[in-house]
Image (cartoon, rainbow, N blue to C red):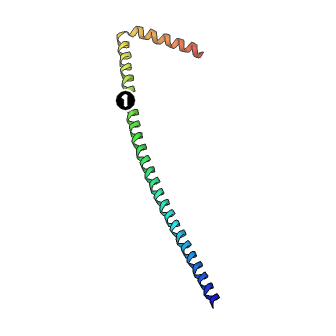
């Protein structure tokens, strides 16, 4: 009988160790899952923040580009008006300059 009680104790001890090991593995798996979920949530937050920053910088870039385009358009308009005024002031000279420019372009292009 002593052998049966020793064997029973050994089985009980082994069962206890297995149960403890299963509990530790289960806890570790739960902690790993919680940690992964937390990391995924943190990464999602970072991506959302980056998209928000990107939109902010794109908006600033668009505003700057629109400003540059408006200034270039204004400068072109001013130059156009200056040339138009010059042509009105000196029409004969303008015709001679245009003819000379046309002749030079025709010679360059081979026509």
Q: Residue at x 45, y 54 (%)?
A: 42
Secondary structure under the numbered disc 1 in the rendered image? helix
Q: Residue at x 37, y 23 (%)?
A: 75
> Up-down: is 104 above or below 61?
above
**Extreme bottom residue here?**
1
Q: Nearer the viewer, residue 35 or 68?
A: 35
Q: Quadrant of residue 62?
A: top left
Residue 81 appears at what percent x and percent y?
35, 19
Left or right, 11 with reference to 40? right
- Disc 1 crowd rating (10 Å Cα; few below 14, some 14-19, many 20+) is few
> Up-down: is 13 above or below 77?
below
Residue 17 appears at what percent x and percent y?
57, 75
Q: Nearer the viewer, residue 63 or 94?
A: 63
State the quadrant of the N terminus.
Answer: bottom right
Q: Residue at x 35, y 10 (%)?
A: 89
> Up-down: is 5 above or below 59?
below
Residue 86 appears at what percent x and percent y?
37, 12
Q: Residue at x 39, y 40 (%)?
A: 59
**Extreme front residue here?**
2
Q: Nearer the viewer, residue 28 or 84?
A: 28
Left or right, 76 with reference to 18? left
> Up-down: is 50 above or below 9?
above
**Extreme right residue here?**
3
Residue located beneath label 1 in the image = 70
State the quadrant of the C terminus.
Answer: top right
Residue 85 appears at what percent x and percent y?
35, 15
Image label count: 1
Q: Nearer the viewer, residue 102 or 14?
A: 14
């Amino acid at each position: 009988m002593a052998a049966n009680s020793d064997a029973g104790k050994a089985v009980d001890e082994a069962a206890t160790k297995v149960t403890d090991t299963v509990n530790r593995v289960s806890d570790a798996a739960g902690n790993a899952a919680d940690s992964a979920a937390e990391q995924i949530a943190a990464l999602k937050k970072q991506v959302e923040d980056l998209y928000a920053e990107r939109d902010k910088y794109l908006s600033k870039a668009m505003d700057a580009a629109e400003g540059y385009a408006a200034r270039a358009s204004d400068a072109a308009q001013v130059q156009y008006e200056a040339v138009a005024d010059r042509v009105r002031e000196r029409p004969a000279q303008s015709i001679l300059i245009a003819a000379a420019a046309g002749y030079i372009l025709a010679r360059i292009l081979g026509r």
